[in-house]
Image: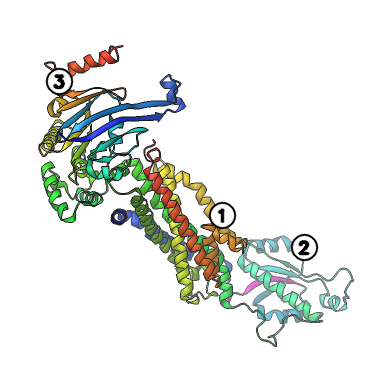
Amino acid sequence: MNNMITIIKKELARFFGDRRLVFTTVIMPGLMIFVMYTFMGKGLMKELSTSDDYVAKAYAVNMPEELRTMTKGLQVEWEDWDGNPGEQERILQEIADGEKDGLIYFPENFMEDMYAYNMGDEPAPNIEIYYNSEKSNSLTFFNNMRSFFTAYEETMVNKYDVNAKTGIYGSYDQATENGLLGKMLSGLLPMLIMVFIFSGCQSVAPESIAGEKERGTIATLLVTPMKRSALALGKVISLSLIALMAGVSSFLGTILSLPNMMGDEMEFSAMSYTITDYLLLLAVIISTVLVIVAIISMISANATSVKEATTAMAPFMLVIMVISILPMMGMESKSAITYFIPLYNSIQAMTGIFGFQANVGLSLLAVGINLVAAGALTYALTKMFGSEKVMFSR
Amino acid sequence: MEELLQVKDLRKTFTLSAKQQKIEKTREKVKVAVDGLSFTAYKGEVFGLLGPNGAGKTTTLRMLATLIKPDSGDAIMDGSSIVKQPEEVRGKIGFLTSELKLEEFFTPNYLFDFFAKLYGVAPEKIAERKKLLFGRFGIDRFAEMKVGNLSTGMKQKVSLVVSLVHDPDIVIFDEPTNGLDVLTAKVVTDFLLDLKAQGKTILVSTHIFSLIEKICDRVGIVINGKMVVCDTLQNLCGDKDLEERFFEIYEERVGRIDE
């Protein structure tokens, strides 16, 4: 026990004594994610939205007067064009260049033909809207026009409505704000957390185990009377602490940048989760970290150099990525049996917690299974530390 | 005299890779590194294992230090078996070889405390022991420098000090003066004689005749994993010098050296 604490203290002293290492593993990931996501979010918003007071400039051919009046609210400055084929090329080029936002073409006598049109007659009068989907202003113009004229058409032949006005029983959509938010977060966050935990482990475990082997410093530890289990446990616990810190940093970076990334429409408030949710999440994350650290430690103990350890970890990382992405693709399994699979159960439990549907029993089962798995793996690591084949192979 | 260290029929084999088999022109899959080696060391003596490279000296010492396990045989170190009680053995011996490195990031001061704790030295003893050993080897001036920044000789001294933090009764040194300059080598040799004067039992392996002649009471000559002679320096050499005797024995057992 004392020896284990001595080992933990040494590992932490090694880590915190190296400012560069602390910066690159703990501070930088969170900071990078925050900066990146914030810029990404802001940039994306700017690209997608046109400013509210923008007045589109568009050509109109044969536009009926009554429709022109009705489109007043849509902020379009119409310029009439007689449809002279000689100018066609120039006008389309202007739309391509973004000088004009579009062109709307009505057949001659559109209104008369439209009123006279009976269902089944062929063909119905057609309104043509030319636009440029590369330019956001032009795309907005097109979408506005299309929805305006589609709505207009519906009023022409109105037989019934679906969900017009407010319902007699109140709001139609029964989803709570939490529900929508939860659906989004439960897809995204478990994956991010897993990846962050993994990269946290990855940056310290190979160095601490394969590195010590490579430099011959682990042999010095092995000739001391301490038990191999004290060394294995000490390594796993201290590495878990460091990985946890790296994970928390990345997690904070993500959470803090979410409002920026999602734009103003989404009111993100971490207050929506209960204390139980947070405690469960913490337990799941800690148990997950222990399993991942134990596995990476075993891979590192088996490798002869840091480089080899890093290479050998790649397949494991792929597995983590794949199981993390499943809920995002809507492919998570609802079966309770999957909670017996270490790491996959972490994803399941976290998906539930973030989706505001935490199942306390199953989440605790996941934690328990992970702890048992971490214990078994640490026992295996102890055996590896005791094996001369593993420790002294070149 | 008390038999502090009894080595009985130690045997260790290594598996050869296919490539290695080709190089050694053999079809045998296993190479016998140590082949039924036995000897005894008495309390308070310096015992030297002498032999050419590849004779199995280092493998023997690594087994005694419990870093690797013997295929068969055993050794009793001050009452503890290296096979059955490896942790007890590790607490009773100080083992130093060039393959044991110190983490370059830490200072000698930190490492001394760290290993003292792992060896179970009582907290009040640590400072006293540190003062003594650091003073003896001139480490005090470098106590707060990272090991990575120390000279090769100073690193070696720190390793030596760290292996003796717990004041063990049995000291095992593999090639104690290898790679050291003459000054540092002398400091180490003098220290070994000091330890002997304190009544410690010391086991060294070397291929340097003068070192054996200078510090050893008894010597065992190891050739091809077997102990061919084991006796006091006096009985072994008579009026000849050790080097001469060694070549005689070698030619007797193996054949002419230039063959």
- The residue under label 2 is A85
**Circles 2, 1 touching at the beta carbon (< 8 Å):** no
Q: Identify which amino acid the numbered label 2 is placed on.
A: Pro
Is residue A2 toward the left or the right of residue A113 in the image?
left
Q: Is residue A46 visible?
A: no
- On screen, residue A182 above or below B204: below
Badge nearest the viewer, 2 or 1:
1
Q: Position of residue A301 (x, y in %)?
A: 40, 45
Q: Residue furthest front?
A: B1
**Residue A383 coordinates in the image, percent (x, y):** 40, 46
Instruction: For marks 2 and 3, give the CA distance.
Output: 122 Å
- Residue B185 placement, left or right of B35: left
Residue A324 visible in this rendered orientation of the protein: yes
Q: Which residue is mark 3?
A: B235
Whether labels 2 and 3 share one chain: no
- Determine the residue positioned at 69% across, 85% down: A167
**Residue behind mark 1:** A322
Q: Residue at x 14, y 28 (%)?
A: B217
Query: Could you tell me which secondary element the residue under label 2 belongs to?
Result: helix
Q: Are marks 1 and 3 on the same chain?
A: no
Q: Decide whether residue A56 is among the magenta residues.
A: yes
